[in-house]
Amino acid sequence: MLSLPSPITSIPVTSGLLCQKFKLANGLVVLITENPIADIVSARIFVGAGSTREPLGQSGVAYLIAATLTKGTHRLSSAEIAEQVESVGASLGVERAPDYFLLSLKTVSEDFLDILSLAAELLQYPSFPTSEVELEKKLALQSIRSQQEQPFTLALRGLRRSLFPPGHPYTQIGPGDPDQIAQLQPADLHQYHQTYFRPDNMVISLSGNLKAFEAVQYCQQVLGDWPVPKQPLLPPDGLQPVAKTPASTGPSSNTSITTQPSQQSIVMLGHLAPSVQEPDYAALKLLYTYLCSGLSSRLFVELREKQGLAYEVSGFYPTRLGPSHFVVYLGTAADNTAIALTKLQAEIARLSQQPLAVEELETAKSKLLGQYVLGKQSNAQLAHLMGWYEALGLGIHYDQNFPKQIASLDVKAVYQAACQHLQQSHISLVGSDTAVQPWLAPS
């Protein structure tokens, strides 16, 4: 019988709960948050994969792996896998993100070992049946065609192509490149799987009615004998810092225009922004909360409620291992496109022209920290957050460090971050010929 490792470290996460970190001999990291309040266990298994690790010319291979991983193993068919999960009322799902690949599961404690064993089989021995791969390719291509008609998707595609160089993994929208997806074969999926699905490139995070020693014992039992390949794991390509586009007052590489017959327009501004491991990440998250989070946010109040310029106004600042992007956008009537862009630009410029008032800063802090606490209420949320931090290389202690970083921000630090990262805007517009005419280059 293999001896169980001792915890490497542990931290309190919420309501007296403790997250403990272990590491098996084959490099697999195991996180467990004991929470006996309900007879449920949630698990998140992160693999250092995703679209950032797709080989050149195989855009979409990670998407197809996520879509077909549960469609068969060397031992089980798709129907048998589904029956094993559904017969005990469990849930099991797979998704891919730019920086990682994720398998999620939830079950009652009594059935956890069985479902974990199934997940281990899926991770180690997927068969990627040809018929299932072909079906998912067709569905992916249909999804891509559908997205090509959606104004928001068109605006985001144009913006990312302006922000990032050609071929950068963060330019990907949806499943991937349609021409490359059409050429992918099961052998490509197997090669990708064999390269990145390995225990020393994985984190399993558990939360629920399970003792730490039981959790480690189960992981040792079903995943502890997974051997580590001899070849070293290479870091993802293409995540190097991105040079900012020079400022310009006219149509240029930092202005994307897409015409589409419509009575409405999408106006989007984007800025290259820090990765999760850079010093200004917390400050930009606070600015995002101030501008875009909820019905009391600056953009919602000013542009929608007071000025009536938008039927939708929001933004996003995704957490990324590589250079991210800070985006604000609004949907408006075609006739309001010009004034909406001007007003949106003014709101962004304001952040680097004058510091936030102390009251504004403290309100944004309280909102962000409150949202952070509320985001750790369920087993699924706890398992995801702890595993996510570990998979991103931040470690579980980031759960304590991030709130401290937010609380320590002052007006000067936030203002300096805005001046550093939000001065050079990239513009993406989607609308009718008439609506976007002022920004079209003369023929």
Image (cartoon, grey):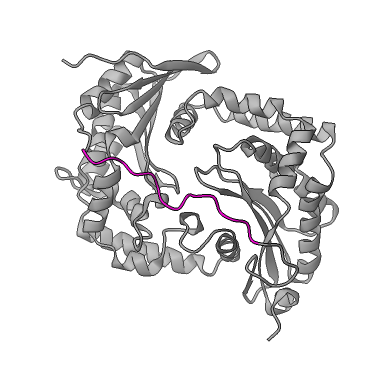
How far across and how far down the image is residue 435, in percent?
73, 74
**Magenta segment: does it hold 237?**
yes
Q: In the displayed structure, does residue 96 sit left or right of residue 420?
A: left
Residue 410 locus on image (x, y percent): 76, 30
Q: In the rendered view, tell whether residue 301 sits above or below residue 135.
A: above
The quarter of the image holding the C terminus is: bottom right
Residue 271 vertical placement versus 43 (above, below): below
The quarter of the displayed image where residue 188 is located: bottom left
351 relative to 221 in the view: left or right:
right
Q: Position of residue 81 (x, y in %)?
A: 24, 42
Q: Which image quarter holds the N terminus?
A: top left
x and y percent of residue 213 in the render? 31, 14
Residue at 75% x, 43% y is 297
Return the residue nearer the eye: 4 or 42: 4
Q: Main secondary structure of the magenta part?
A: loop
Residue at point 29% right, 28% down? 27
* Side of 305 where 120 appears, left or right: left
In the rendered image, is residue 70 in sight? no
- Image quadrant assignment for residue 308: bottom right
Q: Is residue 254 magenta?
A: no
Kindly indicate the quadrant of the structure image that contains residue 287.
Answer: top right
The residue nearer to you, when weighing 165 against 84, is 165
Q: Residue furthest bottom?
A: 443
The relative height of residue 312 versus residue 320 in the rendered view (above or below) is below
**Where does the magenta region start and end?**
230-245
**Residue at horizontal 20%, vertical 33%?**
227
